[in-house]
Image (spheres, coloured by chain):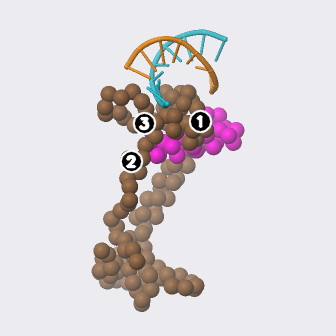
Chain colours: A brown, B cyan, C orange
Amino acid sequence: MAQFTNEARHFFDVRRLVFRIGELASMTDVSARQLRYWEKKELISSQERTDGQQARVYTFKTFIQVSLIKYFMDEGFTLAAAAQKADARQNRMAYIHHFISSGLQGFAKVDDQLAINLGAFDAEQTLMALVPDGDGPITYKLLPNAEAQQMTRAEAE
DNA sequence: ATTCTAACA
DNA sequence: TGTTAGAA
């Protein structure tokens, strides 16, 4: 079974997943003309081009942003309002992502069950969520920080 | 083939 | 906003 620690690991780097304007346009049903216009209005941005190339390069994050703006415009919002709502949505998602990734400290075995290290409960204790193999409720257990840390690390790699 | 800017319908 | 033109 895969083990995880705080270290993020991945098969590919999303920062290398980029699109040119034609691709992004067909992916989002937003015309290239609109994409250039939105960029000029600073509602979206394209990646800085280090080389001398002229063609815009868009990140995956921009793909999400464009999709959100498009969605809100289809809902009837003006471009400016749609962009504002899309921005707010992304900020909420960033917060949630931070909340989750900071809360999930790693996995371990406790009482022969999968245990999810949810991080500090207070100054001395760490909260562990015990996930049963089959059906059944998830239970929680508080362990001394040192013990939780050690067992979480012991299962890693 | 694709994207660029600028301009006009 | 769509759709051109001509250049890169």
Residue A155 seen anywhere in this rendered image of the structure: yes
Instruction: Mark 3 vs mark 1: tell me if same chain.
Output: yes
| Element type where label 1 sits in the image | loop
What amino acid is at disc 1? Val
Residue drawn at the location 38% of the way across and 48% of the way down: A15
Residue A30 image label: 1
Q: Callout 3: residue from which chain?
A: A
Question: Which residue is at the front of the view, A143 or A155?
Answer: A155
Residue A83 seen anywhere in this rendered image of the structure: no
Q: Which residue is mark 3?
A: A57
Q: Which residue is mark 2?
A: A15
Q: With A13 as the anchor, is A42 left or right in this view? A: right
Asked if the residue under mark 1 is in contact with the one under mark 3, i.e. CB atoms within 8 Å, the reply is: no
Circle 3 Cα neighbour tier, 10 Å, few/some/many (<14 / 14–19 / ≥20)? some
Q: Image height check: is A151 above or below A36?
A: below
Spatial CA distance of label 2 from label 3 is 11 Å
Spatial CA distance of label 3 from label 1 is 15 Å
